[in-house]
Image (tube, rainbow, N blue to C red):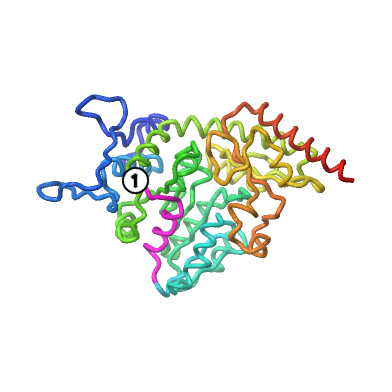
Amino acid sequence: MKPNTKGLNTICTHVGEIKDEQFKGAISPIYMSSSYAYENVDVKRYPRYFNTPNQEALSKKIARLEKCEAGIIFGSGMAAVSTTLFAFLNAGDHIVLQQSLYGGTYNLVCEEFVKYGIEYSFTKGLEQEDFEREIKPNTKIIFVETPSNPLMKITDLTMVAGIAKKNGLISMIDNTFASPVNQTPIDFGIDIMIHSATKYMGGHSDICAGAVACSHEHMDVIWNKAKNLGGSLSDFTVWMLERSMKTMGLRVKAQNKNAKKMAKWLEKHPMVSQVYYPGLKSHKDYALAKKQMSGFSGMMSFECAKGVDAYEFMQSLALIKPSMSLAGVESTMLAPAKASHALLSPEARAEQGISDGLIRFSVGIEETEDLKNDIEQAFAKVVKESLQLQ
C-alpha cells in the first residue's frame, strides 16, 4: 500500500467524503435508502453488506487513519470485537488475551466462548513470557488492549506482533483508548485494529459505533462473518460519525494536552494516592508508551487517598459529569467497579487491580483551571461532610 501522503487533519477532513455532484455541497450527502437496484449495477448494495455509499466511504477514512488496506464499521464497539473474534475462531480453537481488558470484552469471552467450544487463556502479566506461556498448539489469536481500560497499562506491540508471527497467529488490538491519532499499531506489526468508534472517533457522546481496520485478506474473512451476524450501522449514524471524525485530530490533541496537565496536578494532590497515566514519568511503562505512542491519550484513572469516599466525591462534582462512556469533548468520570467493569466478579476485578475506589477520568477540552476548581470543590465538600459525621 502506498504510504500516506496527507497529514492527519487532512485525512480526517477529506478522505472518505462523498462528493455532492448534483448540488456541489461542501459536505457528504447522506443516502438513507435501505434498498438498492441489483440488476445492471457494479455493486449490489445492502445495509447489512456494509457497502451503502456512506458506509463504504467512511470505511476508507478509517482504513487510511490506521494505514490499512481496508476498514469496516459496526453498530457498536462490541459488535466490532465479537464479529472479528468469531470470524477467526471456531470450535476447538484457542485465543490468548492480555489480563487487563475492557469489561465487555472480558465478559464476552468468559460467558460466550464456552458455548461455542472456543478455549481461551488470560495472561498473568504483560511481559513476553506471560504471552508465550499461554500459547497452545490450537492457539489462533493474540488479543491485546493498550492503553488498557481502566488502569492505562501499556503492552509492547512489537513484542506481541513478534510472538504472533513466530507462532503463525493473528494479532489483534483494541486501539480505542489511543485512537489512530496517538497510535497506529500496524507500524509495530499488529494485524487487526479494533475500535469503539463511540469514543474518540465519535467524540461528542451522541452516537454508538464500532470500527475495524486490517488487510484485504483479513477483511474478507471479517466481512463474511459480519454479513451473517448483521451488526451494521444506520446511514444517518454513519454520516454523523464522518462529521465527527473531521475534527478528531484537533479534539484528541487538545484532550492529550489537558490530560497531561491534569495528571501532573492530580499526582501532587493530597487527596489522591495514585494516578495511572502513561504520560507521567512515574508510570512504569512511560518509556514504552513514549516509544509507540505519539500522544498519551485523554484517559487516565486515579485512586482517592485513604478516607476519601470515591462515590461521594463524584456525586459532588458540578462541572465534570459522572457518566458511563468516555472520550467526549466534555470531561467525565466513573467508577469502573460500578460501570465499565461491573459485569466482572469482585475476584476478577481484584485480579486486574480494579478497586472499588478507582476512578476513571476522561478528560475533555474544557479549560484545565475549571476542571481543577471543580475537583477541588468536590474534595472539599466530601471532607466537610466527613468531618460533620464524626
Query: SS of the residue at dot 1?
Result: loop
Query: Does residue 378 appear left or right of residue 244 in this picture?
Result: right
Q: Nearer the viewer, residue 277 or 355?
A: 355
Q: How many marks?
A: 1
Q: Nearer the viewer, residue 373 or 140?
A: 373
Residue depicted at x 84% and y 43%: 386
Query: Does residue 20 appear left or right of residue 129 in this picture?
Result: left
Residue highlighted by disc 1: 234
**Quarter-of-image position of residue 380:** top right
Where residue 15 appears, as percent x and y from the top left, is 33, 34
**Magenta stretch in the rendered image:** 71-90
Residue depicted at x 57% and y 38%: 298
Q: Is residue 76 magenta?
A: yes
Q: Nearer the viewer, residue 262 or 216?
A: 262
**View extreme (front): residue:** 389
Kind of residue at disc 1:
Ser
Where residue 105 appears, as percent x and y from the top left, is 51, 58
**Quarter-of-image position of residue 346:** bottom right
Where residue 68 appears, as percent x and y from the top left, is 36, 46
Q: Is residue 61 magenta?
A: no
Within 10 Å of disc 1 (Cα), the crowding (few <14, some 14-19, many 20+) is many
Magenta span dominant secondary structure: helix
Residue depicted at x 51% and y 69%: 120
